[in-house]
Amino acid sequence: MCNVRTLRIDAKSIIDFPVQPLTVTDIKQYLRSKDIPFHDGYSCLHAPSIFLEPAPEGSGRENYSLFIDKTTGQFLCKETLVEGSWEDLQDCIEVMLNEGQKSISPNVLLGFPESLEEQEEIEMEMKEVQRIWSSSVPFSDLLEEEVQLVKTMFQIGKLTNATLKKFGVRFFKPTKSLVFPWFSGRDSGLRGVKLLSAAVKDDGRVVYTEATVPKVSSYHNLFGLPLMGRKDGEVVLTGREVDSMAVSQATGLPSLALPRGVSCLPPILLPYLEQFKKVTLWLGGDMRSWEASKIFSRKLGLKRCSLIRPGEFQPCPSEALAQGRNLVRIVKASIPAAHKSIVSFKQLREDVYGELANVEQVAGIQWSRFLELNRILKGHRKGELTVFTGPTGSGKTTFISECALDLCMQGVNTLWGSFEINNVRLAKIMLTQFAKQRLEENLDQYDMWADKFEDLPLYFMTFHGQQNIKTVLDTMQHAVYLYDISHVIIDNLQFMMGQENLSLDKFAVQDHIIGAFRKFATNSCCHVTLIIHPRKEEDDKELQTASIFGTAKASQEADNVLILQEKKLVTCPGRRSLQVAKNRFDGDVGIFPLEFNKASLTFTAPVKGKQKLRKVAVDKNNSTEETEEIEFKETSEKPVKSAKAKTKTVKGSAAGKGSTKGSTDGERKNQ
Ligand SMILES: Nc1ncnc2c1ncn2[C@@H]1O[C@H](COP(=O)(O)OP(=O)(O)OP(=O)(O)O)[C@@H](O)[C@H]1O
């Protein structure tokens, strides 16, 4: 039944996914068959909550607080905060109707027992949230010089104290962090905090780091939510808390910040955005934000979304405020997200300009371990299809694993379809490459590396062996919706061949499958890397594009063709090189040698000596004993580089080992 899971190999990390994908028609038909009224919203259907006593008939107070995601069927009752899968909801409705009731207690699902370990973790996290919050200081309690210093540090000099107060922002002295609270929309209870810290690097750059409690995978704060009025019909969605405050202060418009910026829009947040007839996405000032805003607007419903195109005069909101720009005018100049399929150059002209003016960003994410790939391919771009081949057993999986890991460590949300080797083996390879050392010999470091590894936006399909292409594509689509996946790796294509129509010849089947992946990559704005075996060649011959198994379709459809070349030299048996045989982006092709390191399974240099944990500097004067154990992610330079700070004393705080289950965005939290 379930096809996607995160690394943590336990039942809770599996997402319910029906083999037959759900359609909105199925959901509507079911609700109608049970006489449950509903409205058709933007991303969700709205129905009266079955978890609340129904309002007296004719009172007009019917509470449509149950939101059912039109794509997944996942539901959330905004009043009781009960949430769960479509199957859970159906079960609840059946039980309710069987008992002849008009509502059902939220405890049916709320009471779903978490494991003892999970309960303890949640409790510990909540204590940590409270501890940080109560030892943080409201801006009104800081001396004016301190306020100015903090504002300078975070480049928010133009934000007024009144705005900071309105959004409930505080300052946590021990780590010199801004504290953004996560208040539940329902009862204003504190559910979490995000800490933003600034540090000056040796070269004078200021690097901002973020930490959340609870851990980022279960931190679902739409910052600013308690300030929304029931009647507000318009919102400006930003990628950072400081941006939302800038928009709110300068325009007076309601504004919300996404918890993880441009990296994803978890569907669990969609119900909270249903009330807005107009959503303006102003996610930042670079091309990545622009791409993300186009992708997110699909989830939100294109028709109600307008996008702010980044540019010299339209930076991110906080920068616009700092530069004294007119934010009202920028919001007014936003462009509708809904586009016609035929466009004139007039409509494209700004896009073309954007590409010309931002050559580096358009080239995609840069590999940090494979500089030669950057030189030839220029970067990793969304929506492309890469075909990768190489002799049997030459190290294709091992190489692609490191290549994908490199991108994932930089915030590329990644989904693996490993049909040949199981996920535990694959994760072991990746973890070894991540740690750049043989962990078998350093088991004492396992937890430290596994904790960091778990924070990567990395997901695995649980398929093994031969699979049907439609099921695989449906699962990929589902994962793109849930996790904003932007890179899927399929290892390998041959595992999709066996299930197809046997009356067709195998080349036709393969062509059909390649066509389907191509279409998926383009339509979902997701990079697909497809491993295909080569046809049988003589052993000592180098492979070429024409050596890819099947017809020429694979290389025609691919944007990039990569070949792992193996030189059978007696003197140097492990010698491999990577050939870029096709590059549709700018045509550059080339080949470069790879050095394989058997201990770290990497094709790049392993670390020398023992790995050291990075420490986050603390203010000695202010450091209470429990100040350091907070996990930070750098946000300014490399978006998802996680460095964990270790504590002197505190046990079991949020960043400690196993502090939060690797819970997934789509999972039921049973709050
Ligand atoms: N450059 C290399 N030199 C020597 N051994 C390597 C090299 N790269 C990978 N290996 C080792 O070779 C084995 C096979 O690697 P891998 O599974 O990545 O190959 P593959 O090409 O994906 O295989 P298949 O063709 O079966 O799909 C692994 O044990 C791996 O550690």
Image (cartoon, rainbow, N blue to C red):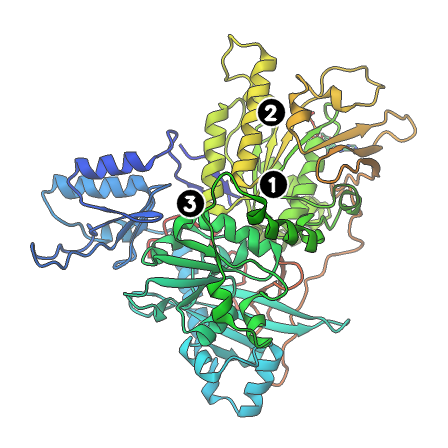
Crowding at mark 1 (Cα within 10 Å: few <14, some 14-19, many 20+): some
Crowding at mark 3 (Cα within 10 Å: few <14, some 14-19, many 20+): some
- Can you tell which mark lies on residue 427? 1
Image side of residue 574 versus residue 292, left or right: right
* Residue at screen point 47% across, 89% down: 141
Q: Amino acid at mark 2?
A: Leu
Of helix, strand and loop, which one carries label 3?
helix
Sequence-wise, the earlier of marks 3 and 1 is 3
Crowding at mark 2 (Cα within 10 Å: few <14, some 14-19, many 20+): some
Which quarter of the figure has residue 390?
A: top right
- In this view of the protein, can residue 664 be seen by the observer? no
- In this view of the protein, can residue 486 be seen by the observer? yes
- Can you tell which mark lies on residue 12? 3
Determine the quadrant in which ligand 1 lies: top right
Sequence-wise, the earlier of marks 1 and 2 is 1
Label 2–label 3 contact, CB within 8 A:
no
Of helix, strand and loop, which one carries label 1?
helix
Question: Looking at the picture, does residue 281 appear above or below residue 341?
Answer: below
Judging depth in this view, the residue of 559 and 475 nearest the camera is 559
Image side of residue 36 versus residue 209, left or right: left
Q: Amino acid at mark 3?
A: Lys
* Percent of width and height locating residue 585: 71, 39
